[in-house]
Amino acid sequence: MIELDHVTKQYGQAIVLKNITFSIDKPGIYCLLGRNGAGKTTLLKSIAGYQNITDGIIKVDSKTITTSTLDTGVSYIENFAKHFNLPVLKLLKIASEVNPNYDYDFASEMMERFELDGKKKFKHLSLGMKTMVSTIICLASNKKVILLDEPILGFDAIMRVEFYDMLTESFRKHPRIIIVSTHIIEEIANTIQKLIIIDKGSIRFFDTLQAVETKAFSISGLQKDVEAATKNLNIIGQDIVGSLATSYIFDTPPEQTGALEIHPLSLQDFFIQTVGHKGGAVK
């Protein structure tokens, strides 16, 4: 279980995480979605105990997490992760030697699936293959919490599909909390259980994809008709051109009439509207 209670992280005058409170109490694959600079990496590093927060409390399995926590129960791999410049197979063996719960069979199977050359030294791998090695080591750790920061950097389309398959297989074999940070949402939609949207250091949305499917809509028509139909609804964005308007809502949509066009929002459009307007969290 992960618990964040009024977590703030500040660098000088810049507040990167702003009074974040949420908890994750069930195993699952969670997607942390946000624009570049939204606070994704800072949040994951804080949960992993790689850096101390300025204020608040972070707990994993009821254990308070700081940089001095000996065993956080968290395995974290950031983008552009670096390893000792050793052959890939040697890196996997070292990881298994320092972690008695390490799933070496899973790591070896993934090595074969992605056709990784175990004799090749880490620095001689392509960016995509370096990322894949780091991800395999992280998933095979069998920690209770797995944090993957932009794990598909450098992957081509085929590698991304195979990565999502590997993620699902790893979770099925060892159910735990896996948080995947990304800015590409549509591809991972079929893999995740819940979506977390962070923007400018604040959590703007934390719910299931089903909630998006049932409550995220665009409503278009004459401005007066749109305003009347959405008067008491939770509006997350709006476009107005002349006398025409489109309101984007996260709420129960009004009944369809001849004066209005009502359409469900794609996940990407929902994300754009959620982080593209001024306001609070999606309710």
Image (cartoon, rainbow, N blue to C red):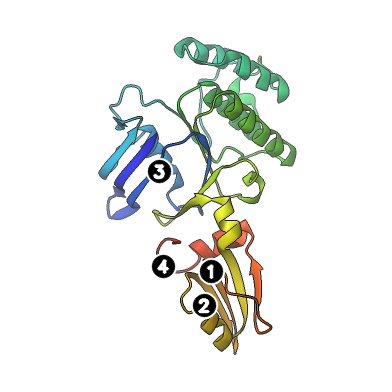
Q: Looking at the picture, which amino acid does disc 1 mark?
A: Ile
Mark 3–mark 4 Cα distance, whole angstroms, equals 21 Å
Total numbered labels: 4
Q: How many other residues sit within 10 Å of disc 2, few (<14), some (14-19) or many (≥20)?
A: some
Question: On residue 43, which mark appears?
Answer: 3
Mark 2–mark 3 Cα distance, whole angstroms, equals 35 Å
Q: Report whether 127 appears left or right of 74.
A: right
Relative image position of residue 237 (x, y in whole percent): 52, 71
Residue under pointer 4: 279
- SS at mark 2? loop
- SS at mark 4? loop
Contact? badges 1 and 2 (CB < 8 Å):
yes
Q: Choose top left, top right, bottom left or bottom right for residue 14.
A: bottom left
Q: Report whether 36 appears left or right of 191.
A: left
Contact? badges 1 and 3 (CB < 8 Å):
no
Residue under pointer 1: 249
Precedes in sequence: disc 1 or disc 3: 3
Precedes in sequence: disc 2 or disc 3: 3
Mark 2–mark 4 Cα distance, whole angstroms, equals 17 Å
Q: Report whether 227 appears left or right of 191.
A: left
Relative image position of residue 8 (x, y in whole percent): 30, 48
Q: Nearer the viewer, mark 2 or mark 4?
A: 2
- SS at mark 3? helix
Please, is residue 281 above or below residue 248 in the view? Answer: above
Q: Looking at the picture, which amino acid does disc 2 mark?
A: Thr
